[in-house]
Image: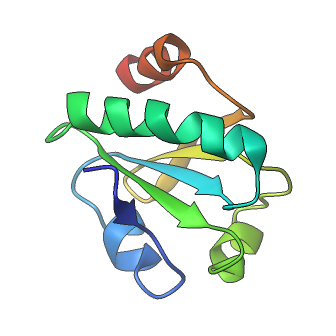
Amino acid sequence: MADVKFTDENFEEEVLKSELPVLVDFYADWCGPCRMMAPVIDEVANEYEGKWKIGKCNVDESPTMAAKFGVQSIPTLLFFKGGQVTNMALGFQSKEALKQRLDG
């Protein structure tokens, strides 16, 4: 389920208006730490299906959303509840660290 892609076009509907809390992984294909983060995001997305909407936003393909939320380095993970950012993590995060933030 982590193959959810957030874009400039669908961000408002999929993230800001989501009934579920949302984790957005801002990434780029050329970014090494982002590629390391990808399998962790996939695992967590499967474990939290139905509790959290978890997906990715490519900063090269969706620069408007990255700029709107002040993403200056990647990976940047933003946690949304009720359309508002409630938490943020920069750089590679272990599965355990990510789960602590999701459960917190």
- Residue 103 makes an appearance in the image: yes
Q: Residue at x 48, y 18 (%)?
A: 95
Q: Please tell me in which quadrant of the rendered image residue 21 appears.
A: top left
In the displayed structure, does residue 32 sit left or right of residue 34?
right
Q: Residue at x 49, y 22 (%)?
A: 101
Give x and y (percent) for residue 80.
Answer: 46, 49
In the displayed structure, does residue 4 sit left or right of residue 49?
right
Give x and y (percent) for residue 88.
Answer: 64, 37
Q: Residue furthest left?
A: 50
The vertical placement of 75 against 40, above or below, is below
Q: Residue at x 47, y 30 (%)?
A: 40
Q: Quadrant of the C terminus?
A: top left
Q: Please tell me in which quadrant of the rendered image residue 13 appears.
A: bottom left
In the displayed structure, does residue 66 sit left or right of residue 6?
right
Q: Residue furthest bottom?
A: 9
The vertical placement of 89 against 70, above or below, is above
Give x and y (percent) for residue 100.
Answer: 46, 14
Give x and y (percent) for residue 91.
Answer: 75, 34
Closer-to-camera residue (104/25): 25
Closer-to-camera residue (97/32): 32
